[in-house]
Image: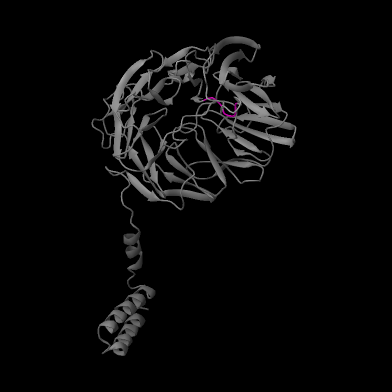
Amino acid sequence: MRGLGAAVIVATVCGVKGLGVRGGLLLGLIVVVVLAATGVWNPFPGMWDWIDRSEPISEPDVVWQQRIGGTPKSVTIAGDTVVVEQRTRVEARSLATGSQLWERKADWAAVAGGDRDPVIAVGKLLVKGYELLDPTTGVVRRRDDEAVAVWTYRNLLLDARCGQATDCTLSAWEPRGTKPLWTAFLPGVHTGLLADNPELLGTRRLDAPRIDDGVAGPEAVPPLLGFPVDGRVHVVDTATGRVLQNVQPGRDERLAVIGGRLLRISATSRDGSCYFVITAVDPATGREVWRRAGVNLRTADYAGCVQREDPQGARNVLIGIAPDGREAVIDGYDGRLLQVGADGQKLLAVDDRYALVRSADKSAVLGRELSVDRDRWTRPAGGKSGAALTPYAAVIADEKPSRLTAVEPRSGRELVTLRTSANALAVGPNGMIIGEGREIGYVRWGAGSSGAPAPVEGGAPGPNPGVSYAPPSDQGSCGPKRELCAGGG
C-alpha cells in the first residue's frame, strides 16, 4: 500500500510539473490526501483538534474542560460522575477527568440518592415507565413500565402509576432499593404523563443570575408532601405513606405544605390592598399550631389578590414581607421569625440554616446564621450579584467583573474564586461544575482562592494532599425543631 502511495505521488508530480505556484499548492494537497488515504500519514485529526480547540472558560483554568453535544438542560454531580441531561439524551462523565463514560437516548433524566448511592431515572416523553441507571456504568438497575411520574430526592424516590385517571398508587423506594418501602392511594396526580419531578405544593426558590436552579443537586425528602388533585390537596407522610389530609382550599386561600405543616394562606382585598393571614395546621390532628397576620408571602399578583404562586423559600422556611416592608424568614414548623432584614436589604438565598443578604447600599453580600440571627461574614459584591446555598458551599455570582465565588456558608472562608462569564451548574463536596454554552468544566476547591480553607481535624479528604476540609454538618438538615429527623417534633 505504501509503494502504491509513492507511485501515485511520483505520477502526480510529473502531471503538474510546470504549473507554477498553483500547481505546487495542488500538488501538496494531492500528496497529503494520498498519504492519508494509504495510511502513511494523516494530519487531519490533529488539524481538526487544533481548529476545534476551546478557549479556557475560567481563570484560573479548570481541572478539565469538555465540549458536549448540545447545551445542557441540567448538570448534576452524582458520586464520582457528572450527569449531563440534554434535550434528547443523557450522558455521564468522570468527575476526575471529564471523559465520557456512557451515553444513551432519553427525553428526561433526574438524579436520586446521595454521594454514595446515586442513581439516574430516565424516560421518554408521553411514554409510561422509567429506568434507573447506574451513574458509572449506565447499566439498568431497575425498570418500571407503568409509572406516569417520578420524584427524585437525596434519600428517596417516589413514583406514581394510575390504573385510571382517578385511581393512582404512589410508591416510595430507597434510591437503590428493589422493593417499595410503602404504597399509598391517591385519586389522581394531575392528568396525563408528567415525567420527572412534577410540581407539588411547597416553596419556590429565589432565582439567581448565572446560577442554575438545580445547582444544589437532589435534596432530602420533606416530612410531608402536598399533592394537588382536582382542586384539592392530599397531604402524604413520606415516612409511612399515610394520607393525612384531603383538603379543599377556601375561595381566598392557597395551600402549601412546608416544614411538616399545612399552611392555609388567605389573601383578601380591602381598601385597595391585599391583607394576608397565614394559618399553620398539624395535618395529623387538624389542629392549628400557629398563625401570622400581615405578612405578604408574594403569592398574589394583586389582580383581585388572586394567589397564583407558591410562597418563596426553601426546605422548611418561607420568605415574606413584613408590614414595615422588611424581608423576613419564617420557620414553617412553628412560625418563628428566624430573621428580619434591615431596611433596604435584599435576600438572595436562604435555607434552614443560613441566609445570604445583599446590603442596603448594594456593596456587599452578608452571610447570616438563622439560629442566632446575626451576620457571620461579609464580602464585597456588586449591585447585581446573585447567590445560592448548597449543602457544600454558598455560591456568589458577580458582574463587572464577571466572577464566580464559592465560600463556606458559616464562616465565609473562600473555597474558590474564578474570573469567568460561565454559569455555576452543579456543586459537590470538593468542587463545582461550571459551563458556558456547550463547554463544561470542573474546578476543585482551593483553586485560585485567596487562601485555602483551614485544615479541620477529622474532616473529609480535600483536594490537596495532607489537607482536610470540614464536611457539611447534617445537624442543620433536621430543621430548627429537628422535625425532618426521626423522633423530631
Q: Position of residue 197 (x, y in %)?
A: 58, 35
Residue at point 63% right, 39% down?
194
Q: Is 472 positioned to the left or the right of 485 in the image?
A: left
Residue at point 55% right, 20% down?
273
Q: Nearer the viewer, residue 27 or 382?
A: 382
For the question of whether residue 413 can be seen, the reply is no
Q: Where is residue 252 in the image (x, y as percent from the top left)?
A: 64, 21
Specify how the rendered protein is coloured.
one colour
Q: In this view, does 354 lie above or below 436?
A: above
Q: Magenta stretch? A: 307-311
Q: Position of residue 396 (x, y in %)?
A: 35, 32
Q: In the rendered view of the protein, which quadrant contains the N terminus? A: bottom left
| Quadrant in which residue 162 is drawn | top right
Q: Dominant secondary structure of the magenta stretch?
A: loop
Q: Nearer the viewer, residue 51 or 303?
A: 303
- The answer to if 406 sits in the magenta stretch is no
Q: Looking at this rendering, what residue extends furthest in the front direction?
A: 271
Q: Position of residue 245 (x, y in %)?
A: 68, 19
